[in-house]
Every structure is written in structure tokens, then in C-alpha cells.
Image (cartoon, rainbow, N blue to C red):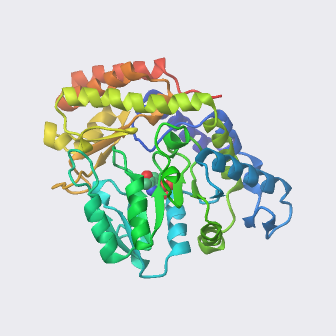
């Protein structure tokens, strides 16, 4: 690379990724093929519109490419329509709201402090300024069960146009059938934001909300789907909804699609279709169970009481007297990256909450199995229990580096 300043930073980031362990549950490593497609000449092309209906010439290959991405993702999720143009997860959600709601209309989604996402109505977001968001919660944070009775009560009271299932910090399984039942009762559209677990669903290890009758799925493509940074919106079968969503993406909220990203999405979807990927997502779940076991053994409280998916939300303040922020910093020192996270009913502030959130998608990509994951969990707890002991931390850091070296980030998955 001619630009030495940028090259230096890329190399430094590469080193950081290689030498540390990535436990942020929304992160992953893409294959060399995905990187190649993402860095391809498609980045030079403007292609506003959709295949066969573009506003610029020279679309022979962009049309074929976008059609391929759509065909693959529809096959993966068993749906009729897909929009592969969203630049990321947040614009994907915004587009669905914009497509289906009028200002002031109501969305019923999961409370942020109970695992929902910022884009599900946090007061600082654009959607929250335009639409009205009401929320449902867990009935009991120690089991993670959603309070479906209250969800139904709120649905009957507020008559939401959209009932939204999905989360970024929730480790249990949602009862999609119940969502659909309640939505039908009040005439709401069902939307599942599967940003975190879409890959596990596509790989067949978690339930597909479409199988229970959900209307729409939104997702990112860079989390468990292991593709480029981007978003998708899928519609199970309703063409009218799909058309509205296409219009909401372009010209509604976006301009030209990022065709290089769509190329990389197509490659990632191809990888997701392989038997190897199915094994990968199964291993993600086995690995988080292995970590759960170690936390249980050490009496560390987990929100939801454990995990059914790829992530764990642990109450480190309640269990060890270490705040989420302290835990994030001290684990960073030993080469483990994860994030602090508020927990349900948190008495601490969002910038120094009680919890940490971590997960297994990235380390599973590296080839970690249950044994290594359990060991990492042990090392995490040891670090937190000895957070001021430099010597212990140094020896743990060495162990982490050794593990990272033993399991290099793979370059190809198929
Ligand atoms: C990550 C995430 C998003 C947002 O995705 P970005 O790509 O960061 O915009 C939306 N919803 C959920 C549930 C997420 O986990």
C-alpha cells in the first residue's frame, strides 16, 4: 500500500485481532473471499434502483450480482423477498418503520435494559422522534422468560402496527408463535430483528421466526452471518410489504447501494450454505454452554439464568463486586475483548453498569471447542478476582496469547 500512514494502522489492527481473543458477541472474522469481494471494483459503480430498474447504465453485472445475493439469502431463510441493500442493521430497521408506519404509530418492542436494541426505540434515535415505542420485558430476569401476558396486555392497549421481536443482549429463546398469535389478535405486523443470531438460524441451529409465521426479518450481515458490515430485510411472502420496504430503502432513506458490500454479502451467503457452516453454528452453541457451566460453577449470576444462544450476560458487579466497566478494562489488559452492559433492573449507570456481555461466534470461527472456551471462562473469572494483581494478570495475558497463537484466525471457511 502506498499510504504508509493508513497501512500502519491496518497492520496494527490486524495484530490486535490476531493476538487477542474477541468475545464481543456481535463481532466475527470474515473469510479472505469475503474481504476480496468487499474490496472489489464493484465499489466504483453507481446502481441506484433495483435489478432491471436502475437509474444508471452499465448494470449487466450489478444486476446479476444483486439477484444472486437475493436468491441465496431467500433460500437460506426460506422467504420470498429480500432487500440486500441496507448499509447496516440500523438503516434496515429504520426502513421497515418508514415503510409501514405513519408518524405517531406504535411499535411494541423489547425494552433496551432487558436486552433490546437502541434501534428499537431509544429516545435518542430518529425513529423514537417519529414513532411511538412501547416495550415489553422479561417476567423474571433469573429465568429470562418474557412476560407474554403483559406483552398481550400492551398490544391490546396500544394497538401497535408492528410487534418487534429481537435483541442484542438476551440469551434465551423467544416464543415466536406467541408473538404471532398476539399480533394477529391486534392486527399488527410481526418483525424479527435477528441481527445477532441470523447466522445461527440460517445454519439451522436456532428456530427461524418465519417458520412460526413472522412477516419480516431484519438482520445485520456481519455478526453470526460472518459477512461484510451490512444489513438485510427479508419478507416471508407478502409482496405488498416487500414493495414498500424496497421503496423505503431506495429512494426513502438511502441512495446508491454499496455493490461491493453486496458482492461480499453474496459470498458470505454462499459460505453459510455449506455443511461446514452448519457445524460452525452448532459449535457456537456448544461453546457458550461450556462457558455457562464454568460461570454456574463459580456462582456468577447470569441474566436469564444461562444461555440458549451465542451470548452470556453476566452480573459481575452483583457476583464479584467488579463493575462492568472495570471488568471490560481489566479483561482488555489480559487480551480479552468484550463489552460492559446494563442488566435488567440495573442500579448502576449505562457507562459503568453491573454487567458484561460476551459470546462465542468469533472464537468459534478460530476453532475453539468446549475445552478452550471453558478455559477462557476460567481465565476471565481469575482475572476479575485478581484485578489488581499485576503478576497474575501478566501470566493470564501470556496464556491468552498462547491460545490465540495456537488458533490463528482462518482465512478460508470452504
Ligand atoms: C447490531 C444490531 C443492530 C444494528 O446494527 P448496525 O449494523 O450496528 O447498525 C440492530 N439490531 C440489533 C438487534 C442488533 O444487535
- Residue 301 appears in view: yes
Vertical position of residue 139 compared to residue 406: above or below: below
Q: Quadrant of the N terminus?
A: top right
Vertical position of residue 335 compared to residue 57: above or below: above
Residue at image point 22% right, 49% down: 141
Q: Nearer the viewer, residue 35 or 148?
A: 148
Q: Nearer the viewer, residue 28 or 218?
A: 218
Residue 240, percent from left and from top? 63, 71
Q: Residue 402: which quarter of the image?
A: top left
- Residue 363 appears in view: no
Q: Quadrant of the C terminus?
A: top right
| Image side of residue 408 versus residue 414, left or right | left
Residue at image point 43% right, 60% down: 180
Vertical position of residue 198 compared to residue 240: above or below: above
Q: Residue 313: which quarter of the image?
A: top left
Give the total number of marks visible in the rendering.
0
Residue 45, percent from left and from top? 77, 58
Q: Nearer the viewer, residue 43 or 250?
A: 250
Residue at image point 21% right, 32% down: 384
| Image side of residue 205 versus residue 276, left or right | left
| Image side of residue 279 versus residue 250, left or right | left
Residue 170, percent from left and from top? 33, 48
Residue at image point 77% right, 61% down: 51
Residue 117, percent from left and from top? 38, 58
Q: Nearer the viewer, residue 216 or 251?
A: 216
Amino acid at each position: 500500500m502506498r499510504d504508509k500512514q493508513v497501512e500502519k494502522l491496518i497492520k496494527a489492527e490486524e495484530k490486535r485481532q490476531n493476538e487477542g481473543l474477541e468475545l464481543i458477541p456481535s463481532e466475527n472474522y470474515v473469510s479472505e473471499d469475503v474481504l476480496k469481494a468487499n474490496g472489489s471494483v464493484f465499489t466504483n459503480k453507481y446502481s441506484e434502483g433495483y435489478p432491471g430498474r436502475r437509474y444508471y447504465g452499465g448494470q449487466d453485472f450489478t444486476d446479476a450480482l444483486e439477484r444472486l445475493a437475493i436468491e441465496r439469502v431467500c433460500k437460506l431463510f426460506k422467504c420470498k423477498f429480500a432487500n440486500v441493500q441496507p448499509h447496516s442493521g440500523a438503516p434496515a430497521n429504520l426502513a421497515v418503520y418508514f415503510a409501514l408506519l405513519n408518524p405517531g404509530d406504535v411499535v411494541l418492542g423489547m425494552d433496551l435494559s432487558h436486552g433490546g436494541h437502541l434501534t428499537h426505540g431509544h429516545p435518542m434515535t430518529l425513529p423514537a422522534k417519529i414513532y411511538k415505542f412501547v416495550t415489553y420485558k422479561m417476567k423474571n430476569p433469573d429465568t429470562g422468560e418474557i412476560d407474554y401476558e403483559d406483552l398481550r396486555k400492551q398490544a391490546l392497549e396500544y394497538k401497535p402496527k408492528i410487534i418487534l421481536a429481537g435483541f442484542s443482549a438476551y440469551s434465551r429463546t423467544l416464543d415466536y408463535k406467541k408473538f404471532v398469535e398476539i399480533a394477529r389478535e391486534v392486527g399488527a405486523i410481526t418483525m424479527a430483528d435477528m441481527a445477532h443470531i441470523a447466522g445461527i438460524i440460517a445454519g439451522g441451529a436456532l428456530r427461524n421466526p418465519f417458520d412460526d409465521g413472522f412477516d419480516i426479518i431484519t438482520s445485520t450481515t456481519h455478526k453470526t452471518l460472518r459477512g461484510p458490515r451490512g444489513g438485510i430485510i427479508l419478507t416471508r411472502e407478502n409482496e405488498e410489504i416487500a414493495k414498500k420496504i424496497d421503496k423505503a430503502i431506495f429512494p426513502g432513506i438511502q441512495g446508491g447501494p454499496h455493490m461491493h458490500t453486496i458482492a461480499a454479502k453474496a459470498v458470505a451467503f454462499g459460505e453459510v450454505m455449506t455443511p461446514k457452516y452448519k457445524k460452525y453454528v452448532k459449535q457456537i452453541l456448544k461453546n457458550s454452554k461450556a462457558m455457562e457451566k464454568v460461570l454456574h460453577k463459580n456462582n456468577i449470576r447470569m441474566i436469564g439464568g444461562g444461555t440458549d444462544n451465542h451470548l452470556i450476560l453476566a452480573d459481575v458487579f452483583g457476583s464479584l463486586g467488579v463493575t462492568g466497566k472495570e471488568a471490560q478494562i481489566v479483561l482488555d489488559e489480559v487480551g480479552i475483548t468484550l463489552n460492559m452492559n446494563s442488566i435488567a433492573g440495573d442500579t448502576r449507570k449505562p457507562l459503568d453498569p453491573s454487567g458484561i456481555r460476551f459470546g462465542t461466534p468469533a472464537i468459534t470461527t478460530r476453532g475453539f471447542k468446549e475445552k478452550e472456551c471453558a478455559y477462557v471462562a476460567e481465565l476471565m473469572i481469575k482475572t476479575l478476582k485478581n484485578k489488581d494483581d499485576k503478576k497474575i494478570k501478566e501470566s493470564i495475558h501470556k496464556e491468552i496469547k498462547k491460545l490465540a497463537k495456537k488458533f490463528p484466525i482462518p482465512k478460508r471457511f470452504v
